[in-house]
Amino acid sequence: MTDTRGPQTQQYGAGGGALPGERQQPQQPAQPYHPPQAYQNAPQGAQQGTQQGGVRRPRTGARTTPRTRKARLRVAKADPWSVMKVSFLLSIALGICTIIAAAVLWMVMDAMGVFSTVGGTISEATGSNESNGFDLQSFLSLPRVLMFTTVIAVIDVVLATALATLGAFIYNLSAGFVGGVELTLAEDE
């Protein structure tokens, strides 16, 4: 059998090169790699579509509004400890707002004379010859209203914190079965 491929050089071993049947890459001097540029600076006569500095001008009919990136994420687990801490702080803030709102509402109603007018009507309706009737103004005094509102706010803090933590546990159980809530987040650029 005759070899028709012509003379071949075989480089095996320490000189290591291409295997038989592979092309050898020409040796190039070691230089830093420069990636190809998308918009090379064109010669002066060919600058119809480019400005100075190699930046391309947008076409007149091209869309110039920025694109919004979207990502679909899934809430797989809610950490019950962090849910408890956040719900506790939000419940305290809600309790403080409730106490302040009750105090402001009581002061506005007292300045308008609501308690004296309604109290007079109730004492006339419930009174008799021997007694004056029910005294609404002493029953709805500011300290008593604020005490009642504070008790309600403390109960609200305890219940809201417990329910939010329980809700995190229930969410984690249901997310294990159905995969959780999927969210689509968009980023405006």
Image (tube, helix red, strand yellow):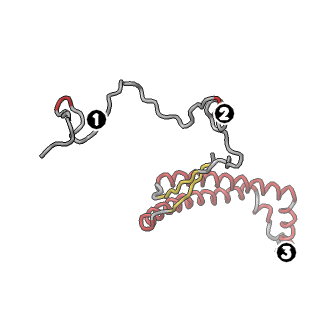
Residue 20: give x, y in percent of width and height: 21, 40
Q: Looking at this view, is 139 or 170 the one in front?
A: 170
Q: Secondary structure at mark 3?
A: helix
- Residue that carries the numbered disc 2 in the rendered image: 51
Give the CA distance from mark 3 to mark 2: 91 Å
Q: For this view, does 179 lie left or right of residue 50?
A: left
Residue 95 placement (x, y as % from top left): 64, 54
Give the residue type at disc 1.
Answer: Gln
Q: Amino acid at mark 2?
A: Gln
In this rendered view, identify the residue nearer to me: 62 or 125.
62
Distance CA(mark 1)–CA(mark 3): 112 Å
Residue placed most toward the observer, 90 or 40:
40
Q: Residue at x 39, y 25 (%)?
A: 31
Q: Earlier in the sequence, mark 1 or mark 3?
A: 1
Residue shown at the point (58%, 57%) measured from the top left: 157
Label 1 environment density (alpha carbons within 10 Å; few <14, some 14–19, many ≥20): few
- First in sequence: mark 2 or mark 1? 1
Q: Is residue 123 above or below residue 172?
A: below
> Would residue 107 appear left or right of 72 to someone viewing this image?
right
Which label is found at residue 24? 1
The residue closer to the viewer here, 66 or 164, is 66
Image label count: 3
For label 3, the residue is 125
Mark 3 and mark 2 lie on one chain; the one further toward the N terminus is 2
1 and 3 marks in contact (CB < 8 Å): no
> Horizontally, is 150 left or right of 140 in the view?
left
Write the residue at 20% across / 33% down.
9
Identify the image quadrant of the C terminus.
top right
Tag nearer the camera, 3 or 2: 2
Label 2 – label 1 distance at C-alpha? 42 Å
Residue 133: image quadrant is bottom right
